[in-house]
Amino acid sequence: MGSKNKLKRFKENETFPNVFQPKREELVGDAFGLKGQWRDKVFKNDNPLVLELGCGKGEYTVGLAERFPNKNFVGVDIKGARFWRGAKTAIEQEISNAAFIRTQIELIEHVFEQNEVDEIWITFPDPQIKYKRTKHRLTNLQFLERYKKVLKADGIVHLKTDSEFMHGYTLGLLHGLGCEVLYANHNVYKLEGSPKEVTEIQTFYENQYLEKDKAITYIRFKI
């Protein structure tokens, strides 16, 4: 994407009512006014709050919001030029239960209050296979601890990935921690009974994986 396109999208994001772009200092200084107030101030209802972490273009955030109008969805990503597409689609299609925030996932505890979140979706994260990159792996122990803080006691996490490594690593970690694995499937498109929200919503990159007959895996669990 050219720099002119990025600048155009950044400027457009600033005008979108469903996009929030707090500064890091605002978050770490606990001066972010929406923390603990997402339902009241953004969605104006008391429906369950669901996050998509590393939402990319926002395809899953928007797709879930369409299918579950009685839930509120927030896409989280540091790259605003990417989720511009999802935010714009939500506005154009009048999907009022989808919003986006530009921030690092590491700061999630500063964006959402303890027990404020009902569900978390992690869709096609970078598996960070190299040892030096493990601290960025979105299902490592440190990230799971962050999720646990913002999730309700019975909150659910969904992991959908094309990486067999990420699938196996996460399952092993969850079993080692004694977490409750509610569902695990190493090839959601080949086995019957896969949840519809897992197979009916497909990202741009997921379609490319499927064209190459790459297996898509899915885990649903509690921390």
Image (tube, helix red, strand yellow):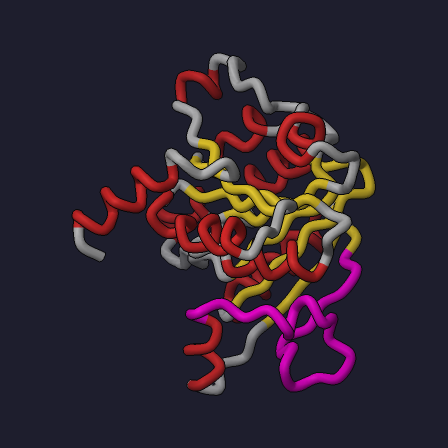
Q: Is residue 155 left or right of 41 when viewed as pictured?
A: right
Q: Height in image: 97 above or below 125?
A: above
Please state, as top left, top right, bottom left or bottom right, where the N terminus lies in the image.
bottom left
Q: Is residue 213 left or right of 187 when viewed as pictured?
A: left
Q: Is residue 152 left or right of 211 when viewed as pictured?
A: right
| Residue name at image x 79 percent, y 60 percent | 182
217 or 194, which lies in front?
194
From which residue to which does the magenta span run? 181-205
| Quarter assignment of residue 13 | top left
Residue that extends furthest to the left in the rendered view of this protein: 3
| Residue name at image x 55 percent, y 42 percent | 99
62 or 159, which lies in front?
62
189 part of magenta stretch: yes
Picture coordinates of residue 181, whole percent (x, y): 76, 58
| Residue name at image x 67 percent, y 24 percent | 36
Residue that extends furthest to the right in the rendered view of this protein: 154
Please state, as top left, top right, bottom left or bottom right, where the C terminus lies in the image.
top right
Picture coordinates of residue 186, whole percent (x, y): 63, 75
| Residue name at image x 48 percent, y 21 percent | 27
